[in-house]
Amino acid sequence: FCVYGGHKSDFDGHSKISRNSLHVFPFVYLPVCFSVSTQGPPPKGYAETYVNNTCILHANEAYINIDGTDLTDYSQVDDGFVVGHNTIYVPGGADGAVVKGSNDQVLTAKKFKTLGHDATSKFIDGTPTADMILSWAKDMLLGEEEHH
């Protein structure tokens, strides 16, 4: 359960895994659920992983930021990153969240999905109430795995 925290990897790190986490209004140097700030994507076999998480964003914030990666190059994205089964709450749903890549490349999460990436994550238009978030956190901290 992370308030203002999310997944961050940098300085050519690799193989970090975030799963079954609740990221509430993440801010990992910038507002983003999953951020990898490296010279390029991790090599095949050393992927960064962000799966089965719930992340709550404000409008037009980044779901994913993967520096040094061409978002339209299927092998760069899918060899270096494992992303899926996430639930993202953001005003506008898949049109309201963005994915950032190299050279100021920005796609909506919806467009990112149409390129064949992250087919299993869902984007919910809106923001859960504070009571909902606290309920999920309580369930998580007391051992209930399914929190969204």
Image (cartoon, helix red, strand yellow):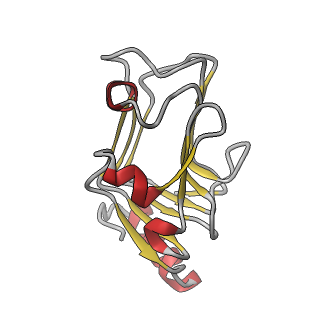
Q: Is residue 71 above or below residue 19?
A: above
Q: Is residue 9 left or right of residue 77?
A: right
Q: Position of residue 140 (x, y in %)?
A: 40, 63
Q: Position of residue 119 (x, y in %)?
A: 27, 53
Q: Is residue 142 visible?
A: yes
Q: Residue at x 39, y 14 (%)?
A: 43
Mark count: 0
- Residues 112 and 145: in front is 112
Q: Residue at x 60, y 17 (%)?
A: 39
Q: Is residue 52 visible?
A: no
Q: Name the outermost residue toward the right.
A: 29
Quadrant into which the C terminus falls: bottom left
Q: Residue at x 44, y 66 (%)?
A: 94
- Residues 93 and 135: in front is 93
Q: Position of residue 136 (x, y in %)?
A: 43, 72
- Residues 33 and 17: in front is 33
Q: Position of residue 5 (x, y in %)?
A: 62, 50
Q: Is residue 98 left or right of residue 117?
A: right
Q: Residue at x 31, y 65 (%)?
A: 144
Q: Is residue 34 left or right of residue 26?
A: left
The answer to which quarter of the image holds residue 25 is bottom right
- Residues 33 and 19: in front is 33
Q: Is residue 74 above or below residue 22?
A: above
Q: Is residue 147 above or below residue 48?
A: below
